[in-house]
Amino acid sequence: MGRTPPDRQRAERAGRFAELLALGYLLVTGHRVLARRYRSPVGELDLVVRRGGVIIFCEVKFRQMAGQDGLPSPRQRQRICRAAQDCITRRHISPEFECRIDLIRITPLSLRGGLPLHHLRGAWWCDPA
């Protein structure tokens, strides 16, 4: 069963709010924002940031329950990898930079659930094309 439009709108708002929380976290932890919601013909990247000599492509996921890992499906990961490669090419990112893909999972704040933000560095690797 598909989502009804109000459910889809609610999910979209939650996702955008999660991206803002992730962005704030990355800024506070010393990252510099290169792009938000980077769109290419092959996919979209939620956040592209830099910290030192590392370019980080961040996928942000909002999950209702803390136990859900939030990892995208293999097909979604492939699309994100293609979008990251497109970003590297179009923005002329030097090969001297290390690049990685991180996952930032946001869950609702609860007294028992621990921190609502989980940053998984190097969440997956892309196959060289």
Image (cartoon, grey):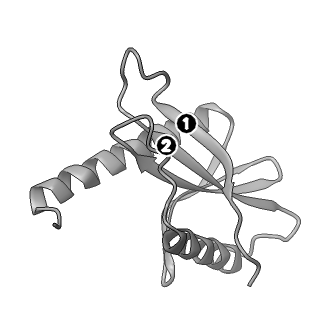
Where does label 1 land, which residue?
Answer: 118
Residue 65: % across, % down: 37, 36
Q: Quadrant of residue 112?
A: top left
- Judge by depth and name the residue closer to the eye, 113 or 19: 113
SS class, disc 1 = strand
Q: Quadrant of residue 84?
A: bottom right
Question: Disc 2 residue type?
Answer: Arg
Within-10-Å neighbours for mark 1: few <14, some 14–19, many 20+: some
Q: Is residue 66 left or right of residue 49?
A: left
Q: Residue at x 67, y 42 (%)?
A: 31
Question: Disc 1 residue type?
Answer: His
Where does label 2 land, which residue?
Answer: 105
* Residue 128 to residue 113: above or below: below
- Judge by depth and name the residue closer to the eye, 39 or 71: 71
Alpha carbon separation for disc pair 1 and 2: 5 Å
Quarter of the image that includes the N terminus: bottom left
Please tell me which of labels 1 and 2 falls first in the chain.
Answer: 2
* Residue 51 to residue 40: above or below: above
Within-10-Å neighbours for mark 2: few <14, some 14–19, many 20+: many
Marks 1 and 2 in Cβ contact (< 8 Å): yes
Q: Is residue 44 left or right of residue 34?
A: left
Q: Residue at x 62, y 72 (%)?
A: 81
Residue 75: % across, % down: 51, 75
SS class, disc 2 = strand
* Residue 120 to residue 66: above or below: below
